[in-house]
């Protein structure tokens, strides 16, 4: 007897044998029992899940001479002819090779003749989405009002390509992917009948590789049996299919946790040596990280893995934070994209894995906000509710936190800090000596209008620029290109070189005026005008040395409480 592949030899013969599609088979059996058959059915879904098989069972069930509970008996002459593919009443048509309008016209001519035997003449059109637009249009009228003895069954893997005019004339059934448990159960039954010894781990690998397709699983089963014989082991199947070993993926996460760059490069060498497909390795790593995330956020029952590996995931997942796993998944996805166009795939993989190894652990923003809130209360004291934590930017640079819980340096502990609400006391006295008294009276903003000379105004304006750079670097940079050009009573006219500086000055007038009032020690009205007079060079701003105390109290507090350091 000639060898028959498993997918054909063990093809379901009755509705109960169709795996994972009970919502379809139950409906069809009830329709046969109550004589409520439609004239057209559309079966849609992924490959290898039983669409054409169900169509054949339906064709046999409605023509069977001795049906049993709406199932074909598979023994009568009509059932045998349909099973062997020589029935004159059931036609299986390939939509890809019979897709033209002429083919549909021939079909229309053929349906005028009734069945030679049985009750129905059945047309099964596989991959119906391959028909041309003209062919679909030619089929519309026949499909809507066929003769009572005609039954159409369409099967497709891409239902979105079928015109809505066809869909509206059919009863649609969506076939679903077959679960791993269902595939394993069916393969275990076949292995038992074929007297083949195979363990559950091997069956799990086959089912997972099949990706929900029973036909793919049966084809892999045949291939494995041919390689291993009647005794199949997991090691043999991994060698034959060159599947990435799950233990390799666990080693990747262990090396990431250990920050072992050398070990990761050695692992890449091992992956290359085993001949693994690098893209398939990254797909497996992505699924591995996803499984850890699911176990950490939910339950191990939600992942597709054997029981030993579920326990392994439960143990390893607790060593990572959810935010870290999400970042690792993002890097994996970026590496997969880069690998597609890379001329050096190995280098791309190494860079991606080393990036994961060098990645710092995530810090919860809620934690930082809580610590900063406590810091704000310590810094501001009684005025904590009045002054924002970060009311200004400092020109000294970006603050980099090196240790959230680090202790302050002794020299910073001893130096008293200036609160943000305290009046400015560190401004340099650059004005004329006759204005010293006015500068000392800066705590009285409603003082009498000042009378300044242009020279005093220029020296004071340099101080305004310097202090503005400490608080708002962008505004300070803009002011550095302006200069006083005229003093009239309590009005100080500031010359701006162009419209950009003029508009920026007007947008920040209120803040600049408040700062100028403190510098000049009295009420002063600022007025911005366009002027071609070049601004005098501003006094150089002394760079904050590493050992100097920062001018702003918030910066002092960050260094004292959090151990921050300045980045030049």
Image (cartoon, rainbow, N blue to C red):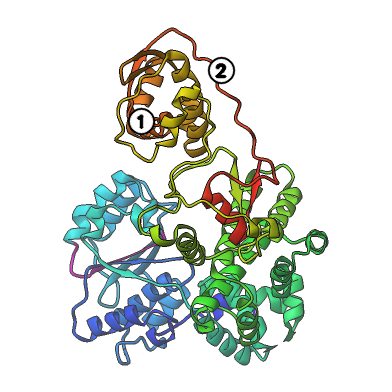
Residue beneath label 2, please?
Answer: 537
Dot 2, how many residues are within 10 Å of its Cα: few (below 14), some (14-19), or many (20+)?
few
505 in magenta: no
Tell me the quadrant of the picture where the C terminus can be found: top right
Dot 1, how many residues are within 10 Å of its Cα: few (below 14), some (14-19), or many (20+)?
many
Q: CA distance from mark 1 to mark 2?
A: 24 Å
Report how many numbered discs are placed on residues in the image: 2
Q: Is residue 353 left or right of residue 94?
A: right
Depth check, front residue: 132 or 76: 132
Tell me the quadrant of the picture where the N terminus can be found: bottom right
Residue 443's x, y, as percent?
38, 41
Q: Is residue 397 left or right of residue 498?
A: right
Residue at 56% from the left image edge and 90% from the top image edge: 189
Depth check, front residue: 179 or 89: 179
Residue 528's x, y, as percent?
34, 19
Residue reaching furthest to the top: 532
**Disc number at residue 540?**
none
Kindly state the secondary structure of the residue where label 1 is placed: loop
Residue 330's x, y, as percent?
57, 57
Depth check, front residue: 76 or 127: 127
Kindly state the secondary structure of the residue where label 2 is placed: loop
Depth check, front residue: 327 or 227: 327
Magenta region: which residues?
146-157
**Residue 96 drawn above or below residue 434:** below
Residue at 43% from the left image edge and 53% from the top image edge: 96
**Disc number at residue 522?**
1
Residue at 67% from the left image edge and 59% from the top image edge: 356
Whether residue 5 is visible to the viewer of this picture, yes or no, is no
Task: Tell me where residue 151 sits by quadrant.
Answer: bottom left
């Amino acid at each position: 007897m000639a060898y028959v592949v498993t997918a054909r030899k063990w093809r379901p013969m009755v509705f109960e044998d169709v795996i994972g599609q009970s919502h379809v088979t139950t409906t069809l059996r009830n329709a046969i029992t109550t004589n409520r058959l439609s004239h057209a059915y559309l079966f849609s879904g992924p490959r290898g899940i039983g669409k054409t098989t169900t169509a054949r069972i339906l064709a046999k069930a409605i023509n069977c001479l001795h049906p049993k509970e709406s199932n074909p008996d598979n023994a009568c002459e009509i059932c045998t002819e349909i099973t062997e593919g020589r029935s004159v009443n059931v036609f299986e048509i390939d939509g890809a090779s019979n897709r033209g309008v002429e083919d549909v016209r021939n079909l229309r001519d053929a349906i005028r003749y009734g069945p030679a035997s049985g009750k129905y003449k059945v047309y099964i059109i596989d991959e119906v989405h391959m028909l041309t637009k003209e062919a679909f249009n030619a089929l519309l009228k026949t499909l809507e009002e066929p003769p009572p003895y005609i039954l159409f069954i369409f099967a497709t893997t891409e239902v979105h390509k079928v015109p809505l005019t066809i869909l509206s004339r059919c009863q649609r059934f969506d076939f679903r992917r077959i679960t791993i448990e269902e595939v394993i159960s069916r393969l275990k039954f076949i292995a038992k009948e074929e007297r083949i010894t195979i363990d559950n781990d091997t069956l799990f690998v086959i089912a997972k590789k099949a990706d929900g397709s029973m036909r793919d699983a049966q084809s892999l089963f045949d291939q494995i049996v041919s390689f291993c014989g009647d005794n199949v082991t997991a090691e043999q199947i991994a060698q034959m299919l060159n599947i990435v070993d799950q233990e390799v993926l666990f080693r990747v996460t262990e090396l990431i946790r250990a920050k072992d760059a050398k070990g990761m490069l050695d692992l890449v060498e091992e992956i290359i040596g085993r001949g693994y497909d690098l893209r398939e390795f990254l797909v497996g790593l992505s699924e591995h990280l996803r499984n850890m995330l699911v176990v950490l956020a939910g339950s191990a029952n939600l992942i597709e893995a054997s029981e030993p590996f579920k326990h392994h995931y439960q143990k390893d997942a607790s060593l990572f934070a959810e935010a870290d796993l999400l970042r690792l998944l993002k890097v994996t996805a970026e590496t997969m994209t880069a690998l597609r166009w890379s001329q050096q795939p190995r280098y791309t993989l190494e860079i991606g894995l080393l990036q994961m190894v060098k990645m710092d652990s995530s810090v919860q923003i809620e934690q930082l906000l809580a610590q900063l809130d406590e810091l704000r209360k310590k810094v501001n004291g009684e005025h904590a509710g009045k002054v924002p934590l970060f009311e200004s930017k400092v020109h000294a640079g970006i603050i980099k936190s090196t240790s959230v819980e680090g202790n302050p340096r002794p020299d910073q502990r001893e130096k008293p800090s200036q609160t943000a609400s305290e009046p400015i006391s560190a401004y340099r006295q650059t004005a004329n000596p006759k204005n010293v008294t006015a500068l000392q009276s800066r705590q009285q903003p409603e003082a009498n209008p000042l009378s300044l000379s242009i020279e005093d105004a220029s020296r004071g304006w340099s101080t305004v620029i310097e202090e503005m750079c400490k608080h708002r670097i962008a505004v300070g940079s803009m002011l550095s290109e302006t200069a006083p050009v005229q003093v009239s009573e309590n009005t100080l006219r500031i010359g701006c070189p162009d419209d950009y500086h003029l508009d920026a000055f007007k947008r920040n007038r209120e803040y600049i005026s408040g700062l100028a009032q403190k510098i000049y020690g009295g009420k002063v009205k600022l007025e911005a005008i366009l002027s071609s007079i070049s601004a005098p060079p501003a006094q150089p701003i002394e760079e904050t040395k590493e050992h100097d105390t920062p001018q702003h109290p918030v910066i002092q507090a960050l260094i004292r409480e959090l151990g921050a350091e300045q980045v030049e």
